[in-house]
Image (cartoon, grey):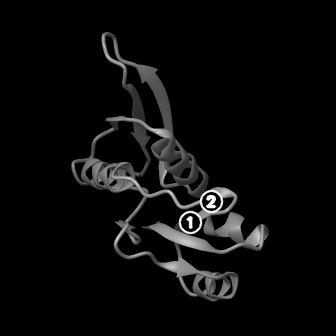
Amino acid sequence: MVFFSAAIPNTVSAIRVGYLTQARYIILPTSVYTRALLDALVRCGAIASYANYPRKGSTWTYCKIYLLYHNAMPAITHIQVLSVPSKTLVIGIRDLIAAMSTRRGCLILSTSRGILTDREAIKLHTGGVCLVLVLI
């Protein structure tokens, strides 16, 4: 299952801007895709946590994303969306293992088992569509 939505690029852009402005948290509307992406970002250490809450008088659910800092420096140095609906970047397990050994950071993948980090995908021996690259 491939998760393509405007929610993923919007979330990544908001996180990037939040880190650039040194915000403690950001608030975004959520979707299933956003929550799956945020779960993966928490697991790889790119954000501290997030919390969902409904907004009064609205049908939307919002989330407060708490950004992670180490000694007043952002936890991540770079975050980038790799796949868009017009151009998908698919990576197999062999390429994933090779790519993982030469860099630091985290790759978020959309696999048949949901949205996973690169380490989780290697443990499950599955490849997928590269969604987001996070350098820590």
Query: Residue at 30% of width from left, 10% of height from top?
Result: 57
* Res 135 seen here: no
Residue 65 coordinates in the image, percent (x, y): 41, 38
Q: Amino acid at mark 1?
A: Leu
Circle 2: is it few (<14), some (14-19), or many (20+) Cα within 10 Å?
Answer: many
Query: Residue at 56% of width from left, 66% of height from top?
Result: 109
* Res 104 seen here: yes
Q: Quadrant of residue 96?
A: bottom right
Q: What residue would you read off at disc 2?
A: 116
Front-lying residue, 130 or 71: 130
Query: Residue at 36% of width from left, 68% of height from top?
Result: 84
Front-lying residue, 18 or 36: 36
Q: Quadrant of residue 85?
A: bottom left
Which residue is the extreme one toward the top?
Answer: 57
Looking at the picture, does residue 99 appear above or below residue 117? below
Which residue is the extreme one toward the right?
Answer: 124
Relative to 21, 55 lies left or right = right
Which residue is the extreme one toward the left?
Answer: 21
Front-lying residue, 136 or 93: 93
Q: What residue would you read off at disc 1?
A: 109
Q: Are marks 2 and 1 in contact (CB under 8 Å)?
A: yes
Q: How many marks?
A: 2
